[in-house]
Image (tube, rainbow, N blue to C red):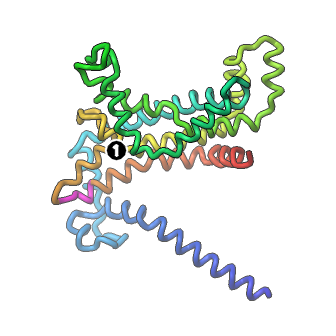
Amino acid sequence: MRASKSLRDILWYIVAICIAMVTVFPFLWMIATSLKPEGEIYSKSLSLISANFSLDNYVKVFKTIPFLRYFMNSLVLAVTGVISNVFLGALAGYSYAKIKFKGRTLTFSLLLSSMMIPGVVTMIPQFLVLKYFPLVGGNDLFGQGGSGFINHYSAIVLPGAVGAFAVFFMKQFFETLPDDLAEAARVDGCSEFRIFWQIYLPLIKPAAMTLGIMTFQAGWNSFMWPMIVLNSKEMMTIQVGLSTFQYQYNTMYGPLMAGTVIATLPTILIFIFAQKYYIQGIAFTGNK
């Protein structure tokens, strides 16, 4: 019996190690490729060890494109998305969880149903709304004559200011908090926003951190939408900027991998330092 259990444990560890290697190998290969000379990338493409480690590819990244500018563009947009999603998502989630109003169930059901619509389906309608928005970007009252929000950071910030998932996620967390806190505050004459801001908001730190990590990762890795709505090279995000290393008949794998390594650092660092809150947030909402 004990031998059988030991054999199962050994097999479990073998399978776990194999899965871990398959998962981690692409990341290790990316780092190794970023440190290889150009000639060695093609001759020893799958090798993780190089006899001539070099940082030339990292230097080429900053010399070939304005990488630091792209990095800051992505950082500003991602942080803005985190702030808007956490605040507005928490505000809407509090309303659905703690305030009884007419049509609450219906509107929340409609909100959840929007999560089932693929994002690619709404790209064209969103683009048209942003382009023909009245009195913005040279448009007249009827949305004609200009470009609206196109080629402006607002075209990225506004559509992603708050998502259905953010509202749903925060509502689930608010429902785990007692209603007695709000009732006592209402008796003392507090407004609903003050109850939300001073009483409930400090209690949702794990959920806010979890949603912030998810939102930052999504905003940081966004590629398709910024490529569609931003035309100026100076406004490019880091993911769109990395695509400049891919040409029609050739790809600069060394600088591309070096830029990708740098681009992954913010999400990795944020997750490392905030993983405690991330796990707590998932646990609380999962229990609910």
How far from the left and from the top, in percent, is residue 168?
A: 62, 38
Horizontal side, residue 28 vs residue 87: left or right: left
The image quadrant that residue 130 belongs to is top left
Horizontal side, residue 96 vs residue 156: left or right: right
How far from the left and from the top, in percent, is residue 214?
A: 53, 44
Horizontal side, residue 104 vs residue 42: left or right: right
What range is drawn magenta here?
250-255
Q: Amino acid at mark 1?
A: Met
Identify which residue is drawn at 17% across, 56% down.
Answer: 248
Identify which residue is drawn at 69% across, 38% down.
Answer: 173
Q: Which residue is mark 1?
A: 224
Considering the numbered disc 1 on the image, is that residue within a helix, a strand or a loop?
helix
Residue 175 in sight here:
yes
Identify which residue is drawn at 36% across, 30% down.
Answer: 155
How far from the left and from the top, in percent, is residue 165?
A: 57, 40
How far from the left and from the top, in percent, is residue 63?
A: 22, 45
